Image: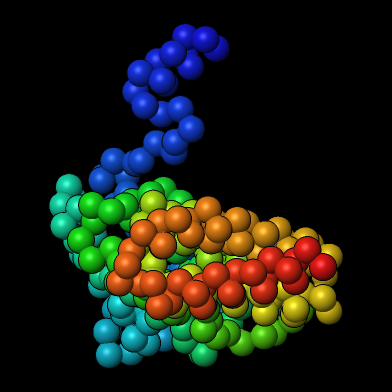
Amino acid sequence: MGDVATQSRRNGYIGDIIKPSRGAFTCMINSEIVAVLAVMRRNVRWGVSYVGDDDQLEHSLIHSLKELRKNIFSWKHQWQNVDPVVYLQPFLDVIQSDETGAPITGVALSSIYKILTIDILDLDIVNVGDAMHMIVDVVTSCRFEVTDPTSEEVVLMKILQVLLACMKSKAATRLSNKHVCMIANTCFRIVHQASSKGELLQRIARHTIHEIVRCIFARLPEVHSKEHEMTDVSSLSVSGVVICNFYSG
């Protein structure tokens, strides 16, 4: 055990998630595309559109996922220069569409969560700020067909999961104060919704809002150091205090 810890310390892995190679990231994105397409294929509405190779018969959501699958293997080791919006957009379109049911939306949210948690979106990636803002915009306005209470709760849990991952991401420093407030307010609303739902969702919602508030206040010194954002800081601080008081009460 000691030898493993020593070697890990030398490699700089203690306390960090080991970032996958670019080839592994390609395979991961591919597996997520397959997962979303598979759950869409099981649905009667999407299954009809999925059959066949004629692109004209395919829904735009399916077509964009399949196009992404064709492109990712050509990027290979150039991921650092690929605009993350390109590979996030097909998943976010699924999340934003009001034509998709809870199971499909849930799988797409899981895909975004996995991309966030393997730290591929770091500060060295081109256009990472716009990508983070796009994730928050789409997830906080997520729309899906509610077919049963259980599937709705699962999607709400995944929304909480993705928003917390945004706050804990290395690229979280690229989030504007407006988008941080959007994350906090969305989690706050889900806490209210959870009061009439299952105990598991209630517990996860309370834990998430607690973690969101902790992340906000941990980074307030960084926000105050940016003079050009001083106008927005007051609104962010007030929002954080209100949420914190609610949680404590």
Image mark count: 0
Whole-percent x and y of residue 136?
45, 73
Q: Where is residue 144 drawn, in percent x and y?
A: 57, 85
- Whether residue 50 is visible, yes or no, is no
Q: Is residue 210 left or right of residue 183?
A: right
- The N terminus, quarter of image: top right
Comparing 94 with 218, the one in front is 218
Quadrant for residue 62, please give it. bottom left
Asked whether 112 or 45 is in front, the reply is 112
Write the residue at 41% across / 48% down. Answer: 118
Task: Check the image and name the residue furthest to the top.
Answer: 3
Residue sitting nearer the eye, 88 or 6: 6
Name the colour scheme: rainbow
Q: Residue at x 49, y 74 (%)?
A: 234
Residue 212 appears in the picture as rendered:
yes
- Left or right of 182 in this view: 196: right
Relative to 112, say whether 62 is above or below.
below
Residue 166, image x and y in percent? 47, 61
Question: Would residue 62 be found to the left or right of residue 245 on screen?
Answer: left
Q: Residue at x 48, y 59 (%)?
A: 220
Snapshot quadrant of residue 152 = bottom right
Relative to residue 233, is residue 147 drawn left or right? right
The answer to whether residue 39 is above or below residue 148 is above
In the image shown, does 7 or 147 lie closer to the viewer? 7
